Image (tube, grey):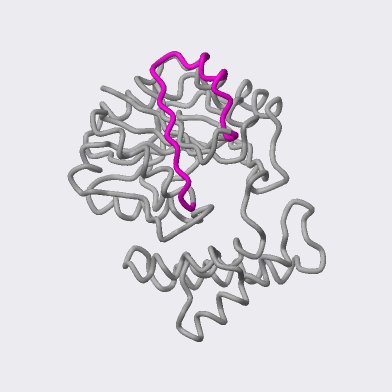
Amino acid sequence: MRIAVGYATKGRRDVIALSIIALARQTRSPDHVFFSITSEEDLDRNDLDQVPCPVSVISDQASGLCSQRNRILERCSEFDIVIYFDDDFIMRSDYIESLETIFASDENIQLLTGRVVADGASGPGLSASEAEETLRVSENHSAMIEDVFSAYGCNMAVRMPLVKKQDLRFDEELPLYGWLEDMCFSRMVVLHGRVVRATNLVGVHLGVKKARVSGRKYGYSQIANPLHLKSRGLVSQPLVIRYIARNLAMNIARYAWPEPWIDRRGRFRGNLLALRDLISGKVHPRRILEEI
């Protein structure tokens, strides 16, 4: 089984260096690693000497994560599996080895995601030392497989034969940070096979806040992106309503007392702009590329 790993990174030169260290200590090395960057400042090429397999660097100056991930897909036709890791995802050393075993055990599994034992995205973020300690004490689980609604984009792997047969792509109508791009991709894959999570694929998502989009743009995406997925027939209206209501409620509740690492006021203003555009009939994810 030929396995490729893909990283889409922007503005996190020091962070991707940590991920390369984690990749280098895998008990099963990938057969190729692709780095999709937006400029030479995104990556220190000297760090690539640590990668124990061939490496390709792809330059992509388009508007976001989905575009960068698609440029990787386009280079992976000869592989069986492509694993996408966020540039701030640190996986346990047996991650790729265990993943290969699971894919070999069930041909119906088309998209696979692992168990995130600590997620800095839900807080101020985690340090590399905190991630290492968390992985050191993480329990070894047998491979319990459960079907899930969506893979988690910080760590997910897809079978390339399905991608080629169905011409699957990440939706570039979700620009910049590409919020919900993992759900969008998962709901396309599930039409053709299983989307699952495995408990023995273990990692830590640092949740680095550096190089994220502004609070206002993110807030706009909190409304526009679920509506876009609904327009494509990938998610139900009740789910969209729950997403929008939850985000609005949280941004309103924390408006006066925001978390230090979240621009709640910016997000709420972005929510209001998206709702205004919804009423006027021009709401769309790509509006965040404009001055909103």
Residue 82 is drawn in which quadrant? top left
- Residue at 56 percent of width and 79 percent of height: 275
| The C terminus lies in quadrant | bottom right
Asked if residue 203 lies in the magenta stretch, the reply is no
| The N terminus lies in quadrant | top left
Q: Is residue 291 above or below residue 42?
A: below
Pick whichever, 262 or 60, lies toward us.
60
**Could you tell me residue 216's position as x and y percent?**
65, 65
Pick whichever, 261 or 215, lies toward us.
215
**Could you tell me residue 201's position as x and y percent?**
46, 30
From the viewer's perspective, is 185 left or right of 20?
Answer: left
From the viewer's perspective, is 167 left or right of 4?
Answer: left
**Could you tell me residue 158's position as x and y percent?**
32, 38
- Residue at 48 percent of width and 75 percent of height: 283
Pick whichever, 35 or 242, lies toward us.
35
**Could you tell me residue 258's position as x and y percent?**
78, 61
Hey, which residue is sitting farthest bottom in the picture?
280
Pick whichever, 220 or 236, lies toward us.
220
- Residue at 41 percent of width and 73 percent of height: 237
Q: How many marks?
A: 0
Hey, which residue is sitting farthest right in the picture?
257
Residues drawn in magenta: 41-63
From the viewer's perspective, is 164 left or right of 136?
Answer: left
